[in-house]
Image: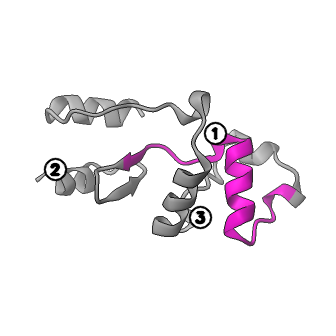
Amino acid sequence: MKKSFAWCATHGVEFAFHDYQKQGVERARLVQWCQHLGWKSLVNTRGTTWRKLTAEQQDIVTQSQAVALMLEYPSLIKRPVVETGTQLLVGFDPQLFASFVK
């Protein structure tokens, strides 16, 4: 997140930050993200929250299972999720960010 914030500041990109780990995320928005990107691109399987899950919880095969798990454990959602109005980005990639502000 720090890299994303710094990149936006350096390039004069205004943004509104929503901390879904603390504030949560609406189910409808999470479903939209999954429909747009696919739930596999949103679930952070490399973090400590994922490693703390049981094997049964990690056995996700449907979008509804993924959404339910991300709602229960918001820290499973990869960061950042950037909504540009018409586009949706997941993760920080300076070149990708640059391509969306031009």
Q: Which residue is depicted at the point 63% across and 39% down?
A: 75
Q: How far is the residue under mark 3 from the one under mark 1?
A: 14 Å
Q: Are marks 1 and 2 in contact (CB under 8 Å)?
A: no
Query: Disc 2 residue type?
Result: Val
Check disc 3: other Cα within 10 Å, few if <14, some if 14-19, many if 20+. many
- Mark 1 or mark 2: name the one nearer the start of the chain: 1
Choose between 98 and 30: the one closer to the eye: 30
User: Is 1 positioned to the left or the right of 64 in the image?
Assistant: left
Residue 11 coordinates in the image, percent (x, y): 14, 36
Q: Which residue is depicted at the point 47% across and 66% down?
A: 37
User: Is 28 positioned to the left or the right of 54 in the image?
Assistant: left
Residue 18 falls in which quadrant of the image?
top left
- Mark 3 or mark 1: name the one nearer the start of the chain: 3
Residue 87 falls in which quadrant of the image?
bottom left
Identify the residue under disc 3.
Answer: 39
Residue 14 falls in which quadrant of the image?
top left
Residue farthest toward the front in the current orientation of the protein = 28
User: Which residues make up the magenta segment?
Assistant: 57-82
Query: Disc 1 residue type?
Result: Ser
Whether residue 101 is situated above or below residue 1 in the rendered picture: below
